[in-house]
Image (tube, helix red, strand yellow):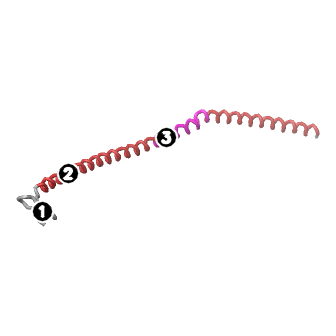
């Protein structure tokens, strides 16, 4: 009986060693497959490409925003220039009217309080 138990024990140990060898082979195989998958799927490169794409979209959005602001400012500057031209035209018109009124008032001989004699120019009052 002892011989039978020793024989069974050795068979069990051989089976266990064989199972462990197969497990180790499978683990090595899985490790190799994982390395291959990692090499094919470089997560750092994928993250870098995603970041670059996001930055390009962000830059494009900011560029369009700034372009809109610049065009708005350009329109505002043109409108301000037109307002200054209109203002200058109004000032010139007012100046010409004031000069015209001064010319008309030069011809007035009699003022409100001064009543001068038209022939000698002496005050009557």
Mark found first going from the N terminus, 2 or 1: 2
Name the residue carrying label 1.
Answer: 123
Which residue is the site of mark 2?
Answer: 95
Q: Is residue 114 left or right of residue 12?
A: left
Determine which residue is flagged by label 3. 55
Q: State yes or no: discs 2 and 3 in contact (Cβ < 8 Å).
A: no
Residue positioned 93% across, 37% down in the render: 3
Check the image and report above or below for 108 versus 85.
Answer: below
Closest to the observer: 43 or 123?
123
Q: Does the segment drawn in magenta span residue 44?
A: yes
**Quadrant in the picture for the N terminus:** top right
Question: How would you rate the neighbour count of disc 2 (Cα within 10 Å): few for under 14, some for 14-19, many for 20 or more?
Answer: few
Using residue 57 as the reference point, say whether residue 99 is left or right of it: left
Label 2 sits on a secondary structure element that is helix
Marks 3,1: beta carbons within 8 A? no
Q: Which residues are magenta?
A: 38-58
- Image location (x, y in percent) of residue 48: 54, 37
Secondary structure at numbered mark 1: loop
* Residue drawn at 76 percent across, 34 percent down: 21
Disc 2/disc 1 C-alpha distance (Å):
34 Å
Residue that sits furthest to the right in the current view: 2
**Sequence-wise first label, 2 or 3:** 3
**How far from the left and from the top, in percent, is residue 103?**
13, 53
């Amino acid at each position: 009986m002892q011989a039978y138990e020793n024989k069974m024990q050795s068979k069990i140990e051989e089976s266990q060693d064989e199972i462990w060898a197969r497990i180790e082979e499978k683990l090595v195989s899985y490790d190799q497959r994982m390395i291959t998958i990692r090499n094919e799927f470089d997560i750092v490169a994928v993250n870098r490409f995603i970041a670059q794409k996001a930055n390009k979209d962000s830059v494009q959005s900011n560029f369009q925003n700034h372009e809109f602001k610049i065009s708005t400012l350009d329109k505002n500057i043109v409108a301000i220039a037109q307002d200054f031209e209109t203002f200058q035209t109004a000032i010139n018109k007012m100046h010409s009217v004031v000069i015209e009124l001064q010319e008309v008032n030069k011809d007035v001989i009699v003022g409100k309080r001064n009543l001068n004699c038209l022939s000698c120019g002496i005050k009557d009052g």
